[in-house]
Amino acid sequence: MFKPIYLLFFCLFSVLAHTQTASNTAFETQQDSIKKSLFIKQLGNGFLPTKYFNFDLRYLVKFNQHEGFRTGLGGVTNNAFSKKYRLNGYLVYGFADQRFKYSIGGGFRIAHKTNTWLNLSYTDDLQETGSTKFLTDKRFFQFFEPRLLNIDLFHKHITQAISLEHRLFSKLLTETQFAVSAIEPTYNYSFYINDKIHNVYDLSALKIAFQWSPFSNFEYSEKGLKETKKGFPKFTLQYTKNFKDVFKSDFAFSKVDFRTIYQTGTKDNIASEVILVSGIANGNTPLTHLYHAYPNNINKQQILQRFSVAGLNSFETMFFNEFFSDKFTTIQFKQYLKPFEITERYKPQLVLITRYAIGTMKNIDRHLNMSFDTLDHGYTESGFEINKLLFGFGLSFTYRYGAYHLAQVEDNVALKFTFNVTL
């Protein structure tokens, strides 16, 4: 008489068990999908995540004219290691200069909501002469850095630094750094000041940087503040003050660097982009810490010998080490046209480009053993890119005209590959 009841309970148990199994399977599938999505996102940001440590893909393989192939390993601890403390570093080797470079550092979080970190670091590496790094550009990753291939003007630096990262409010990020550096150019250069020639020198610099994104939207989560909507324009401002006789520093100078980026639309459709960069250096500033305009043309005679890969925001017809400035401004305009829908997946895109640079320099005679021009009369180039023709590769054509137009027509032309890939 109890068999029907037993049968009913058995059926109910089977249904519940099947429902629970299906629910667990769906949950596991969802978790796997989330993990896969996070992994791809980390990879797109240049990290290979492991349990406690994320390997930094920027240090795996690079190439430039001074080091040749440069390879190594680097990374940073993640939240599974600690949410309050972090360790970071890298070790690389250049096969042409036969020299190891490295950095080791760490930090601890003072406040979670404002993402306030106090950091310490020791670095022995190279930096491109005339380049400017904004402290707030903490993370910029490309699978392939085309402009790096052609750079030959580097200076060695051994830098000890202490910095404080702090978000004043959601749309304003700040970082302050004090660093002591020993500088040694890898090329034949001397800085003549106060009747003394400096082949190597020490610097002690305080930097304060601000990154303001007034039209972006941010949200707080367990992992911190996240930008949910990118708004434009974005503004970055950095002030540098180098002190003489502080920790044996040789010179006194100051710098103000500014950048703004404005973009409408999306790059994979119809978009306009304007980038303005400006810098002013006052005082006894060596060439290593002055400005170039991000040139990307190899110093060779024939067009085919100069055939390389175009950079993202560089002057493709401007030769390396051709111009230096202590005051400069560049403005770049790009117009992304609607992609050509040849097939569902094959959609090449035409981009129209115009770039302009102007600058000047006082006391050029202080910079010994270097021959270069200034940008007093304004430098102009225009051209186009056809991107995503094959496996992320495309073609770029740029022409140099105006005040710095060269006598040989072919010397004003830059024909190059482009490379665009996203995850």
Image (tube, rainbow, N blue to C red):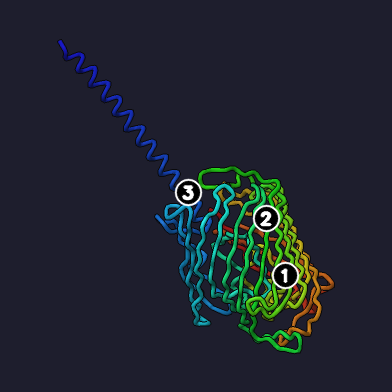
Whether pointer 3 and pointer 2 mark residues with C-beta atoms closer than 8 Å, the reply is: no
Instruction: Please state which amino acid type lies under the numbered disc 1.
Output: Ala
The earlier-in-sequence mark between 1 and 3 is 3
The residue pinned by badge 1 equals 293
Q: How many marks?
A: 3
Can residue 304 be seen here? The reply is: no
Q: Secondary structure at mark 1?
A: loop
The earlier-in-sequence mark between 3 and 2 is 3
> Which quarter of the figure has residue 316?
bottom right
Q: Give the residue at x 56% y 55%.
A: 422
Label 2 – label 1 distance at C-alpha: 21 Å
> Which quarter of the figure has residue 6?
top left
> Residue 33: x percent and y percent?
43, 43
Q: Secondary structure at mark 2?
A: strand
Who is closer to the viewer here, 153 or 342? 153
Q: Secondary structure at mark 3?
A: helix
Instruction: Please state which amino acid type lies under the numbered disc 2.
Output: Gln
**Mark 3 or mark 2, which is nearer to you?**
2
Q: Residues within 10 Å of mark 2 (few under 14, many from 20)?
A: many
Q: Residues within 10 Å of mark 1 (few under 14, many from 20)?
A: many
> Residue 30: x percent and y percent?
42, 39
The residue pinned by badge 2 equals 211
Quarter of the N terminus within the rendering: top left
Whether pointer 1 and pointer 3 mark residues with C-beta atoms closer than 8 Å, the reply is: no
The residue pinned by badge 3 equals 38
Q: Is residue 18 above or below residue 360?
A: above
> Residue 287: x percent and y percent?
71, 78
